[in-house]
Amino acid sequence: MSAPSNAPESAAASESSLAAAAVSSASGGRAAVTDFAGRHIGPGPEEVEEMLKECDCESLEALAAAAVPASILSDVPLNLPAPRSESGALRELREIASRNCLRRSYVGMGYHDCIVPPVIQRNVLENPGWYTQYTPYQAEIAQGRLEALLTFQTMVCDLTGMDVANASLLDEGTAVAEAMTMSFNVGQRRHRGEDRRAFFVADNCHPQTLSVVETRAEAIGVRVIVGSLADLAAKAEGAGAKELFGAVVQYPGTLGDIPDLESLFSGLGAAGVMTVAATDLLALTVLRPPGEFGADIAVGSAQRFGVPLGFGGPHAAFFATRDEHKRQMPGRIVGISKDSAGRPAYRLSLQTREQHIRRDKATSNICTAQALLANMAAMYAVYHGPEGLREIARRVRLLANAFAVGLRRAGLLVAEGPVFDTVTFQCGAEGVEERAIAQAIDFRRLGDGRYGVSFDECCSDTDVAVLLEVFGAKSALSLDELVQEADAAVKEGWRDRGREDEILTHEVFHRFRSETEMLRYLRRLEGKDLSLTTSMIPLGSCTMKLNASAEMFPVSWPEFAGLHPFAPDSDTAGYAKLFEDLETWLCEITGFHGCSLQPNAGSQGEFAGLLAVRKYHESRGDEGRDVCLIPMSAHGTNPASAVMAGMRVFPVACDEQGNIDIEDLRAKAARHAAELGALMVTYPSTHGVFEEGIREICEIVHANGGQVYMDGANLNAQVGLCQPGAIGADVCHINLHKTFCIPHGGGGPGMGPICCAEHLTPFLPGHPVVAQGGRDSLGPVSAAPWGSPSILPISWMYIAMMGGEGLKRASQIAILNANHIARRLDPYFPVLYKGPNGLVAHECILDFRRFKSVTVEDVAKRLMDYGFHAPTISWPVAGTMMVEPTESESKEELDRFCDAMIAIHGEIDAVESGRMDAADNPLKNAPHTAEAAVAAVWNHPYTREQAVFPAAWVRERKFWPAVGRIDNVYGDRNLVCTCDGMEAFS
């Protein structure tokens, strides 16, 4: 969609004028109390002055001028509203939220209201100890959320009847699309020599799921066939199955039907067709699981397990499959291995399937998932236990059937067959809409007098009575009589469909019934994870900055959290205003014309941006432009996304300084001039510098007919200083969970909206349920129209409180902090790449390759003993660390990190010189647990104190790793990914 006018709002001017003046008054001054920027940015004025002198710069402006090429450095202020104070921004956003109208929703379609247990809302969703961690790549200090994610996988495997599950995907639509891709890959191997390129989508699937699948299928040349279950059965019985590699059926269906799939899936399986069940976890507590009747894959959304509607997200999807397909499964898998003491320990397993290692051969481009929401769903199951979940499911089922009985008693035509929560019926009664408005309720309108009503955990007998009255079907029977008749109908209709076996038998689902015990359990898990509440997380390219409390408050406001994604426009004026503001601001920041907020992860932003480029080429008759040039230093998601978008990947070399080899680019662009679709480039580069040749790079690509896609992972160094659109890019995605303060959530949620030039704006994503996108929309890349809207208020608050000058200052300080670390550590660990003036951008790469006895992994583990999460290791260069401190960290914290690194260098030197044992030293044995420190026997040649208290500050705030170093190889060779597998370590 096109961005609205960029005119600043005057409403905030009066309360924010003092703050605005404070932000711009000095190069590094600590601002007044009302100046949010002064609280977001870590270093105070004296610290800034000290670090500037260290960089031989007189001011932040001089630093930016030295680091950023003059050809792209902008001196034009961002045209954004003046900064609000925290209270002022919250007041304004509260007014915007009030424009949303909360009506009781019975729309369903894969989204259901639910009750978030307060102990989970307070202690997980709203707790920075849970939402500020990074993806658990350093597993020894991520045992809490890994345990919770293993519980999630156990729950999914148990309820679906499958062998293995992952630790969540993005949403149900993309989970089905991932199932299609996996089925295609399995089919390519299974049916070599056969032309199976068709995927069948049953017409009982949710419409948004179908559209997301069609978007993904078109890009990779897969034909989607939509038809009834009878059509699918006919194909299974005849020659039609020979064109299919897979098929998906909704179970229960979008209109409430519960198909008997055993014979159908058996026939498809015999014909070599992969079968996918898109299902509902709550229904599966009482409904026969897909694993019992032959499904190869089961997918769906865990949203109704205690995660707010949030106008569509974020919600954790799930994906489960049979053991034989585990290495083709997309997304992260949490498994169990053992640590250095032989104790069980959790870790991410089989990572060689993933994009950050396999690149264009990866099973998916999924990077950010929905870990925080998967943790909430898992804890919801722990909180209720199997008996509680079944009670909720039975109540929902009984209410839906009581409503169906009442409709039939009133003579309305109701769809036949057993139902779980959704009733579809014909109603010609007049006044339905008026009565619905009067009762403040909403439901699904199917056209021609047909309606759908879905019941959920929040419903009661009163809902049944109100709905019957709205549809003119007020019954002569009492509610008790309707319920009794419904109970009899359920017993008859569910005779062959009901689930009677035990579910969720592991003890974790039975132990924590009192809130006291539940609270302590959540706290124990939290205490095993290092988050931003402990120390800085200096991960290069990940931008782990402050997630301010004022930014987080609105996420829980009912006006944002309680809306169904398909609520009518008349109910969503507040969200419309929020979207308009964000689109305007992001376009101004990036220098682009159009914006789509739909992609619900950076990886999906990449996919959407590349599809927009392909659509643009096709609109000009250039269907053959499918080559994507990608530098060797690129993020793993780049080549994985290009392949997913149906493009052929060709690498571009980097020179000795880490920059794109312009001559290699020129040669390859010329060689592929007739088929060049795009170049994907990260700026500043993945090597941590502002490449001088970026304009020339863009010009070369354009001269050869291609488009420039800019990966926005490093946008935190650009905001207010330069703009992707002005540099020469055509489209970029923006990681809102990096630059714009949405927290990483222990591995998700994230948001990856895209901004683009005017010529690409018509090709932005659309949606089948809610009108969206340009005239030539590429279709949806997310199940919900705006991806994960309930976390967008975080970025709105950040931009509103920072203002243009505050955002620029944040970029300057991010660059200053990185250069401070580079200057301090360069004598010990050489900074691998620097710009022409000896400066880095907002991150730097430290080189460890000269050491013979110590690896970069040893250093990463030893940092845990000092209370730090390691920087990004061995990427983009093996044997290195990429450090990004962000602007939120104070000089004191930066120096504490540098002191730790320098101390570790001393330990390395002792090992390298022979003063410490090469095999038995603090680095090789790190991290050291409390259990190891207090053991009766200590056989190491260094002291316990040196092991666990290597620096003075560690005594004041020691973070104890929960386990010792984990054996990754053992974990992959002996894959165990459910809680039941813990018995193997007892």
Image (tube, rainbow, N blue to C red):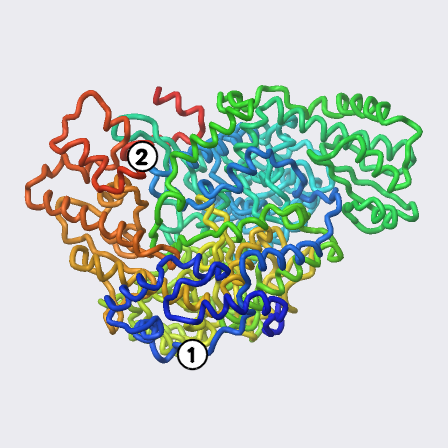
Picture quarter with the N terminus: bottom right
**Circle number at residue 471:** none
At numbered mark 1, what does the secondary structure look like: helix, strand or loop? loop
In the rendered image, the residue lying farthest to the left is: 914
Camera sees residue 522: yes
User: Residue 589: x percent and y percent?
Assistant: 50, 69
Residue that carries the numbered disc 1 in the rendered image: 75
Q: In this view, does 526 lie above or below 200?
A: above
Crowd around label 2: few <14 · some 14–19 · many ≥20 (10 Å): many
**Circle number at residue 960:** 2
Camera sees residue 618: no
- Left-right relation of 493 to 637: right
Question: Disc 2 residue type?
Answer: Trp
- Left-right relation of 177 to 704: right
Q: In this view, does 475 lie above or below 55?
A: above
Crowd around label 1: few <14 · some 14–19 · many ≥20 (10 Å): few
Instruction: State the residue at coordinates (65%, 57%).
Output: 767
User: Residue 865: x percent and y percent?
Assistant: 26, 39
- Left-right relation of 132 to 415: left
